[in-house]
Image (cartoon, rainbow, N blue to C red):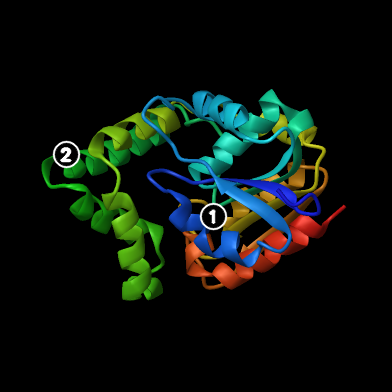
Amino acid sequence: MNSSKQSLVLLPGFLCDQTVWKHQMTALADVADSSCMEWAPEHDSIVAMAEAVLRWAPPTFALAGHSMGGRVAFQVYRLAPERVTKLAVFNTGSDARPAGDAGAAEEAGRRKLLAIARSQGMRPMAVEWLKGMLPPYRQSDTPLVEEIIQMFERKSADLFEIQMLALLGRPNATPLLQQIQCPALVLTGADDAWSPPARHAEIAQFIPHSELVLVPKCGHMSTMERPDEVTAAMRAWLNRL
């Protein structure tokens, strides 16, 4: 690795892979040696995912996670804060699954998608899933939609279930936020219905050295929907001392 560059570890979200980070890996190549984690079936909990990242990552690194990957990033920091030089979380959350009706509704929604994946296949599941993931004005962006669907099609219904259960059993990272001492970036799309701006404002409020970025005209898949804006925010974050 080029010693003048930072090591940057990228964590994809639910059923995602380095497709999510493609633009950033290329555009930030002058300042970062980037590598993207691949989730495997044995990574069956958020903590197991974090432990796998720590086995795989360089000794110290900047860390960015999208969606489920953001939740994993919090756990990586909890397990080994001395190894994380900078932390960025995108379109994510820090809470555990809520109790009562809200938690039951979350599980029911996820299981409905799993049932489509098992009975009809990953593409019909992805088409249904994207209705909530992308804002209405991006639903007709065929290249974007197709790239996301093909990414999900490369995964299996079994992996969907493994990651679904990991998310449903996610630990509560909110108490950790005040302990994060490295430069932090908290980013979401202004139109992300799943991971809304208000939630990210709360996260950023708790993290001492954080910057909040709300990307306009953008939903849940920020790194792919608005790659230039996200990359610019990441470059500024990587350049912070």
User: Could you tell me the amino acid type at mark 2?
Assistant: Arg
Point out which mark residue 98 bears. none
Residue type at tag 1: Pro
Which residue carries the number 1 mark? 196
Indicate the position of residue 158 as horizontal and vertical percent values.
26, 33
From this view, report whether residue 159 is shown above or below residue 189: above
Q: Are marks 1 and 2 in contact (CB under 8 Å)?
A: no
208 w.r.t. 238: above or below: above
Give how far across and how far down residue 91 sits, in percent.
Answer: 54, 52
Numbered badge on residue 118: 2
Which residue reaches farthest front?
1
Callout 2: few (<14), some (14-19), or many (20+) C-alpha neighbours within 10 Å?
A: some
Residue at screen point 70% across, 48% down: 1
Q: Distance between the residues labelled 1 and 2?
A: 29 Å
The answer to which quarter of the image holds residue 30 is bottom right
Q: Circle 2 sits in a helix, a strand or a loop, which is it? A: helix
- Which of the two discs, 1 and 2, labels the residue nearer the N terminus? 2
Name the residue nearer the viewer: 17 or 14: 17
Residue 79 x/y as whole percent: 67, 24
- Whether residue 193 can be seen here: no
Q: Closest to the observer: 114 or 228?
A: 228
- The number of numbered badges drawn on the structure is 2
Q: In this view, does 30 lie to the left or right of 161?
A: right
